[in-house]
Amino acid sequence: MATSSRNRFKSDPQLVARMSITMFLIGALYVAVVAALIFSGINIAFVLVIAGGLLFVQYYFSDKMALYGMGGRLVTPEEAPELHGIVDRLCALSNMPKPRVAIADTDIPNAFATGRNPRNAVVCATTGILRRLEPQELEGVLSHELSHVAHRDVAVMTFASFLGMAAGLFTRMALYSGMFGGYDDDDDNNGAGAFFLILLVSMLVYVLSFILTRTLSRYRELSADRSGALLTGRPSALASALQKVTGDMARIPTRDLRAAEPFNAFFFTPALANGFSISSLFSTHPTLEKRLAQLAKISAELGQPV
Amino acid sequence: MGLLDTILGRSKPVKPDLDDLFALPSAAVTLQAAGNLRPTGVGSVCVKPAEGGAFAGLREQINELLAMDGGKYDESTDSFGFTWIVRRGDPNDLSGLVADLHGVNATLSDAGFGPALLCTLVTFTDSQAPTIGMVYLYKRGTWYPFAPTGKDKRDNSRELQVRAYVGDELKVEPDLSRWFPVWGAPGF
């Protein structure tokens, strides 16, 4: 290559380290579960096959399912020249194949990208986000979504959530078979004990895997923010888009939360709320503050003289 | 992107490949012979301006550099927020034009803004049909023709014809889905 040149893009070793630890824990959980299965000699291969099958469908048809779920419609360059123009340019800048482009006719400001690989990806924006954001902000959002495609987040998250899904499925099946007397234990009492043990273990695996995948998901979001901002060179545009979008979207969950408050009292202890809230442990996206802080840091880095 | 980058969710910025820019002058001879297309003497570099003081400083530097050259350059910003640095020169001196454009590219790239380079555009014309552009994609190191015929309309058959003319001399982008349009680019 003819150009040597400095690289203005710094990687974030801390984020990489935290993500690696999370992934390592997910991997360790896999190993532990497989080892336990082999050791206990229980034949639950069929559960794994079913869970694998379900996830494969989810993975393989992720683009179609998400489009259908959001009510997205594929648009041609003639129908949406602006949107296509932005995607075109981002793809040329980052050297990635152009995904299909869709618009969902809803006023909720949102955008998503999905697809099992960059060749089969689709980016979708809602009419709500197209209406609210300035071109620069929209570019920031699309750049974030294209980073998800480039990082193959669908594949990564599918793989990471496999164990949780299998464990959840197994818990449910164990419960049903226990409830309806499907468990054959004529000759000894150990059957009931083993049943509760399996139930307990699979519930534990489910909870652990749930927390870990959610953690991983938040790191993937931060990574996509980072790559997206570096691609456009305008972290501030993405930050202002986030403020506009999450500011609006935040109102909708708040109403849900109030309606669900009586239940919350049973499940969550308020003692956790100080500094480390349970909702931040379970949410798929990092808090707005965290995302804005990261973008501000990148903005400062870009400001440094050549 | 490698497997490790995928797993860790980081993408490396793509460095531009400037090598094949210099293949254009010889291809232009073929274009003139086969398609009666002559250079218009207008060429431009498209770059995505980054925010912050570093890019602003660089921009001043480029402006000074370009101003020294007797006002042959000017600069415009399109509706997508991309900056076009336009060079208008002698239609008969295509090699000089390409060398000048390479100079702008190299300055930007050396300052660390290589990933922000989008494309280089050189326009050609014949007496009847509308102007046609040859677009160089840095990130692929490939060329493709772009023939706009009006607002958001392009002449695909003419573009494919041009590909047939220069296919042997230029590295033409093989993936047609990457022949993205540059509506409203300077020089048309």
Image (cartoon, coloured by chain):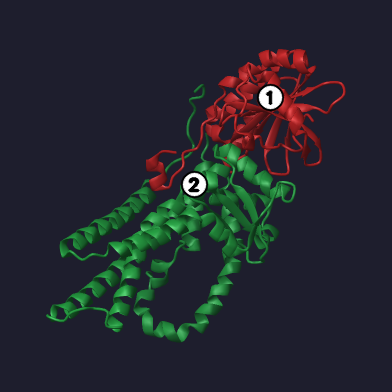
Three-letter amino acid code of the residue under disc 2: Asn
Q: Which chain is red?
A: B
Label 1 near label 2: C-beta < 8 Å? no
Which residue is found at the position 66% from the left and 34% from the top?
B179
Q: Is residue B165 above or below residue A36?
A: above
Inspect this view and state whether residue B146 appears: yes
Q: Which residue is mark 2?
A: A117
Q: Dot 1: few (<14), some (14–19), or many (≥20) neighbours within 10 Å?
A: many
Q: Which chain is green?
A: A
Residue A253: image quadrant is: bottom right
Q: Dot 2: few (<14), some (14–19), or many (≥20) neighbours within 10 Å?
A: some
Q: Is residue A254 above or below residue B90?
A: below
- Disc 2 to disc 1, C-alpha distance: 29 Å
- Taking depth in this image into account, of A92 and B60 the one nearest to the observer is A92
- A88 with respect to B151 (left or right): left
Q: Which residue is mark 1?
A: B163
Name the subunit of mark 1: B
